[in-house]
Amino acid sequence: MSETPAFVLDSYALLAYFDSEPGGKRVEQILRDAQRGTCGVWLSLINLGEVLYITERERSLQQAHEVLAALQQLPIGIVEADLEAVLAAAHFKATHRLSYADAFAVAAAQKFNARILTGDPEFESLAELVQVEWLQA
């Protein structure tokens, strides 16, 4: 019996979904699959914060609240920033060129043996650590 596929969303993927960008269609498909129970979807709490601050900065605090409310209705598991995640993210940040928030996505992907959904080129250097599914721009 095969293992259920798992995906980790980074801020790029979620913003593409909420902004109805081309890559957001793939995120929507994955979320529908997760609703049906055919895959798992995860989001680091740190990446959640990143989505919220970007939304507030580029749009408004009200929009950030609306995004959070919408996210809470989606079939996405939130990965806490516990000691294990912080240590793993710190290591990835120290050894690769990526943002600290993205390092938490990598830690979550490793924890759940998941593929990262993104269009962020920072993940190109991590091919030996995690699988990446590239969203169309």
Image (cartoon, grey):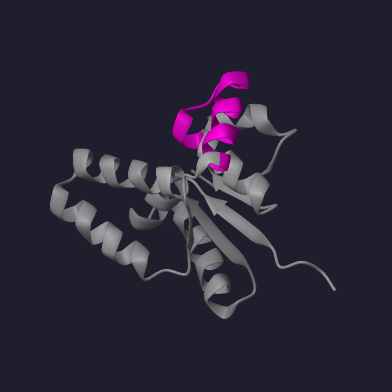
Q: Residue at x 69, y 63 (%)?
A: 5
Taking 47 as reference, is 110 left or right? right
Range of magenta residues: 84-102
List x then y, in percent, for residue 1.
85, 74
Residue farthest toward the front in the current orientation of the protein: 83
Residue at point 47% right, 44% down?
81
39 versus 110 height, above or below:
below
Please identify the quarter of the rendering in which residue 67 is found.
bottom left
Residue 71 inside the magenta-drawn segment: no
Dominant SS of magenta comes to: helix
The percent position of residue 109, horizontal first and vertical second, equals 62, 47
Query: In which quadrant of the rendered view does residue 90 lie?
Result: top right
- Identify which residue is drawn at 48% across, 53% down: 43
Residue 87 is inside the magenta segment: yes
Q: How many marks overall?
A: 0
Q: Nearer the viewer, residue 8 or 25?
A: 8
Q: Is residue 71 left or right of residue 63?
A: right
* Residue appearing at x 60%, y 65% in the figure: 40
**Residue 83: image x %, image y %?**
52, 40
